[in-house]
Image: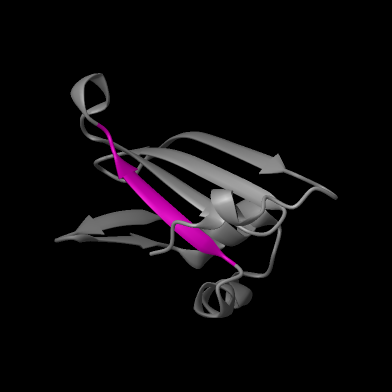
Amino acid sequence: MIRFEADAIEIDAATIAEALDIDPSLVPQHIRDGSLTTRCERGVDSDEGRYRLTFFTERQRVRLIVDAAGNVLQRSTINFGEHPTGRPFRRYRR
C-alpha cells in the first residue's frame, strides 16, 4: 500500500519487506540504523504523475514505479550477492 499525503509518501512496511525478503517488523529498525536507505524521484514530462521509489540495502536494490494513486506499475529487484552496492549507490537517504 502506497499513499501520497501533502509532501509525504507512506509505504506499508510489508511492501518493502516482501521485496527485500525480510520480516516487515524489521523495516523501521533498518531505516533507523541506516542499513536500509531510500530515494524518491518524481517523474517529469512523459513520466508526469509517476514516482520512482528506490530502496537500498548493502546487497540489494528494490525499485518501484508507482502512479499518483499509489498503484505499483513496475517492480524490479537486484541482488548483488557477494558484491555489496557500496556507498555511491546508497548515498541518498530520506
Which quadrant holds the C terminus? Answer: bottom left
76, above or below 45, in the image = below
Q: Position of residue 5 (x, y in %)?
A: 19, 60
Q: Position of residue 89 (x, y in %)?
A: 56, 49
Q: Residue at x 14, y 61 (%)?
A: 6
Name the chief secondary structure element in magenta. strand
Which residue ends up furthest to the top in the rendered image? 46
Which residue ends up furthest to the front in the rendered image? 88
Which quadrant holds the N terminus? Answer: bottom left
Q: Would you say residue 15 sits in the magenta stretch?
A: no
**56 and 49: which one is in front?**
56
Q: Which residues are magenta?
A: 36-43
Q: Residue at x 55, y 73 (%)?
A: 34
**80 and 53: which one is in front?**
80
Q: Residue at x 61, y 61 (%)?
A: 17
Q: Would you say residue 38 sits in the magenta stretch?
A: yes
Q: Position of residue 10 (x, y in %)?
A: 34, 62
